[in-house]
Every structure is written in C-alpha cells, then in structure tokens.
Image (spheres, helix red, strand yellow):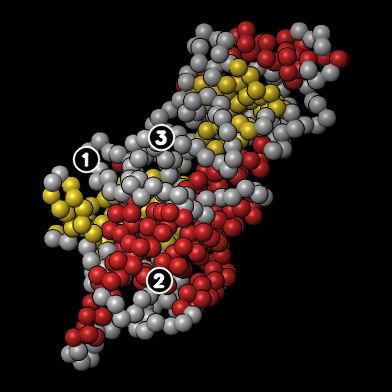
Amino acid sequence: MWRSGTLSGTVGPEVSGRGLLDPTTSTKCLLTLALQVVDPVYAFSVSEGVVYLLDLFVLTVSIDSGGPRGVSQLTILDQLVHRMKHDTGNEHTIKPCGVFDMIGGVGSGGFIAILLVLFGLKTEEALDEFIDMTANVLDKQGVDAETRTAALKRHIDGLLEKYRIDGNSHIIDHNDRPMGCKLVIPISYKHHAGSICILRNYSLRKEKTLNLTIAEAMMATLATPPMFTSTQILKDAAIFDYISADWMLSNPIEEIIAEAHQAIGAEQRVACILSLGCGHPGVFAAPDDSSTSAWNEFLENLVTDSERKAEGIDSQMGHLGFYHRFSVMSGLKKPNTKRENRHGDIVTHTQAYLDSATVSRKMDSCIHSLRKRDGVSSLDQLSKFPFQIFIDGSSEDRIRADIMQSVRSLGTEHSQKRFEDCLLFLSSPGENIVRLLVYDNVDDPDIDIASLLPQGDWCAVVITSRNGLLGDLHPKAH
C-alpha cells in the first residue's frame, strides 16, 4: 500500500521501476516502469492533476519495552513526525500508521504500537494516552497484581469507548480490508515463558495467527509479572495464560525484522528500520552485599537491558544507512520511588537528548530515509513541472487522442494541430520550462511507443507498463 498524506488514486496498478526526474535541467529524462514484484522501487499517485512519485521501500518501527519511559519513545517519534511535517510544508496530519509499513513493540512498546496502528492515533494523541495510562495504572503504588490488572482493564475499556471502538473488535478484523500498516507484538506464555507468540493484525500462510480482541492484546502486552496477572484467553475449549514478553525480549528488533521479511517479502528493499529505545541504563555493578532485593534488581536490569542487543544490531547494520536507533543516553534509569513530575523529567531529558547536534543529524538522516518512501523528495522535484499531461497508454489511438486534446486545449493557436504538430510543439523549448508527460498503462507490446514520444530535451517522460522490455528504450533511466 502506498500512502502520501491525502493523495488519492493511482496511475496504473502496482507500478514500479527506477529512474530520475530532474525538471531543473535541460536533460530529457525517460523513466520506463514495468510491473516488477521482485524489485519494486517507485509508484505513482495522482491528486488534483499532479503526479506524485512514491517509493516502495519498506519502513518499519521497533519499540522497546520501557514501562513509563515509553514517554521518551513517543517524544522522539513526535519530534520525527514534526520535522517531516515541517520539511514537506504539509498542513495535513501525519500519522505513523500512514508512514510506516510495520510498527511493532514489546511490553509497553506493544501498547504504544496498538495506539498507533489499531487506534490510528497521532503521536501527540498517543503520548497523552500513554501518560494517562502510566499515571493511572503503571505508577500506582501499594497495589497488588490483581488490583493493578483490574485498573488496566477499566482503563482499556475507557479507551475503546473514547475512540468508539467496539469492545469485541479483534486485531484481525475479517470484515474490513487489511490495514496498510502492519502490527507486530511479541508476547509469551505463562507456563512456557521462554517461548514467544506473535500477535498480528494480518494473516500469514505459515501459521494461524492468534486473533485476540484489541482489549485482550493490550492486556497481554502489558501483563508483566509480578506487576500484573496473566491474561487468560479461552481458545479451542482450553484456557491459555499469556504474559508480556519483555522479560525475555526487551528489544524486539530482530523479531520485527523477521516478521517484515515474512509478511512484506524478502525481495522488498528497506529504506528505514527505526528502533526506539527507552534510555541507556548505564553500567551495571554487581551488589556488594547478599541482599535479595539488591540482587533481584541487578538481575532484572541485566535481563531487561535492550541496549546490548541494540549495539549488536548496530554493528551489523549501522553502516548500511537504513538502521536508525534513538535512545536517551542518560537520565532515564529506572527510579526506585515514584516522583511527582516523573513524566516531565522524562520529556526534559529526552528533549535535551534530541537537541544535541549529533542526535539532530541522526534524526535528519532518518527523515531522509523516510522521505525516500513518502514522496517528499519527488514531490519537491515534480512540483517544479508547470506543464503536465496524463496520457492513457492502453492503445495507440488513445495516446494520439489524449496528446492532441491536451495540446489543443492550450489555446486557439493550437486548436488545429495534428498529432505530429503536437509532438513537435512538445519537443520545442517553451518559456524555458520542462514539460512532464505520463504515459500510463502502456501494456500492449504491439504499440510502437518510441514513435509516439516527443524528442529533444524539453520533456520529461514517464511510462508505466507491465512490459519490462520497454526498459530498453532508455536503459540508464530504467
């Protein structure tokens, strides 16, 4: 699914290929596109007479488990979205579910992923809801697991009602078309805690996906013992107990990548893998005494340290240019006691982290990766074409008719032009501008498309086609 703000319609089904459009030079750019499932790069979308070039690169987000420190992750994501919106000059709302192909998380990260994908919230909305949940559930002091679990259930019921979501809605809704953004949430089994079960909002051929209700999924991803009780699900006349997977999998990046590989396809190119951490825990020192509580805390820190895996992934993929990891370096260690302005402190530390020159450059690099997909780079280019013609390429007659109609409509001085005259006009310099011609769905192999193209350096030509042989027209641009 290709998304770009409020764009609608597509020029040809599943168009893809390679090429360059540069209206600022006098070089004629011939971009020939063929339907290629194995190597997709570009797609086109049309809105109000303007063609937009959209990339088909894969974009994924992986959100670590961090409890209340998820506020930091959403603050980082909100800053990312803000910069994207500012760069594009887009007045419309940018939602993460409209930008990314897949959003996944574990523990509190899974809860955030559900807010972004199934609820379809904006980042600032998700941040408000997460802070509210943290204050009313996660930060409750002096309560047992049963009481906290009951509070979480009430809170989730309130969320569903607030956003008018049926309490019986499942994460895979078979009555609706599949959502463009895929959701991935690893959870675990109470009685087999070492294994992982993946919650998805889509189906896979290799296995039957566990289709919980949205409420059950939100309960399960936060069911971290001993804070919460397990989430019991009745399935096939048996009761299954699910818990959060954050004890075993605090950083789910490898699982998210594996899911993208299976669901989206191994042949798809990757533009951006965004990993959101919940803060660097610092150096762990073994306790000097034999205090059980001190050793429990030490072991918990070791188990839930997501930064070690992040460093391993960075060593494998960091040099490739599409892996981007953001996690506050200091100030977000797990507090031993509740503080009144804890969320404000988290936001403050996160903002200071984002304000550093190094992190700011990293974020700009990440946004550049995202712009490969959402059409920003191509929008900047294509908006410079003041003259655009969209041509039905299904037959030679339609091509001739559309070109003549478009040129003749420019004024009375062109009203009597024949097809050859129209091509000559399009080939000639026109007020020092480059014209854009889009030949859509040129699928018939019997069409001699070369004879129907204007010549010279004053037209940028885009051809969408299922006929890969058309790439021979201009091998360098294909």
Q: Does 403 sit above or below residue 345?
A: above
Q: Is residue 225 left or right of residue 54?
A: left
Q: Residue furthest right?
A: 413
Q: Nearer the viewer, mark 3 or mark 2?
A: 2
For the point 46% across and 36% down, the residue is 1
Q: Position of residue 36 (x, y in %)?
A: 43, 28
Dot label at residue 177 = 3
Badge 1 amino acid: Glu
Is the Cβ of the residue at disc 1 closer than 8 Å to that at disc 2?
no
Q: Position of residue 443 (x, y in %)?
A: 50, 16
Q: Position of residue 273 (x, y in %)?
A: 42, 52
> Around disc 3, counting alpha carbons within 10 Å, would you say few (fewer than 14), some (14 to 19), or many (20 or more)?
few
Badge 2 amino acid: Asn
Asked where in the image residue 105 lies, by quadrant, the reply is: bottom left
Q: Is residue 24 visible?
A: yes
Dot label at residue 136 = 2
Camera-side residue of 145 and 167? 167
For the point 44% across and 40% down, the residue is 180
Local secondary structure at mark 2:
helix
Q: Position of residue 65 (x, y in %)?
A: 34, 65
Dot label at residue 207 = 1
Q: Does 400 sit above or below residue 156?
A: above
Q: Earlier in the sequence, mark 3 or mark 1?
A: 3
Badge 3 amino acid: Arg
